[in-house]
Amino acid sequence: MPTIVKCPTCQADVVWSEQSPNRPFCSKRCQLIDLGEWSFENNKISTAITSNTQMSAEDQQEMLEDIEAMLAQSEDTFFKQ
């Protein structure tokens, strides 16, 4: 019996398998809605960041550049479906 999970965005049933490429989301649309919620800081990790784990401005910039580079490489496939 396949594993069934709920889409975090719309709560639709999603089969956890190769046939569901956007898992745990039911669709690319729900995946992008969730990404938008994180980018607007509507979703947050509940644990406070301590001074020991805060990133320097240089590290933050480097991380953003890495993310932008990854998106640029996969832009054609990431936003199409």
Image (cartoon, rainbow, N blue to C red):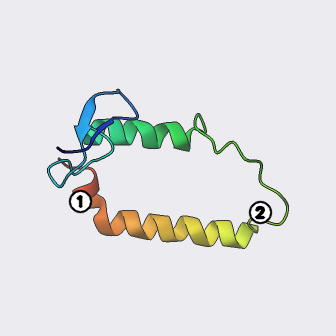
Residue under the point 20% across and 51% down: 17
Residue under the point 43% across and 70% down: 69
- Relative vertical location of residue 9 with respect to residue 39 in this rendering, above or below: above
Mark 1 falls on what kind of element? helix
Mark 2 falls on what kind of element? loop
Q: Amino acid at mark 1?
A: Asp
Q: Which residue is mark 1?
A: 76
Q: Which residue is mark 2?
A: 54
Residue 4, position as x, y percentages in the image:
26, 39
Q: Nearer the viewer, residue 49 or 60?
A: 49
CA gap between label 1 and label 2 equals: 33 Å
Name the N-terminal-most of marks 1 and 2. Answer: 2
Which of the labelled discs sits on residue 49, or is there none?
none
- Relative vertical location of residue 50 with respect to residue 38 in this rendering, above or below: below
Q: Amino acid at mark 2?
A: Gln
Residue 18, position as x, y percentages in the image:
17, 55
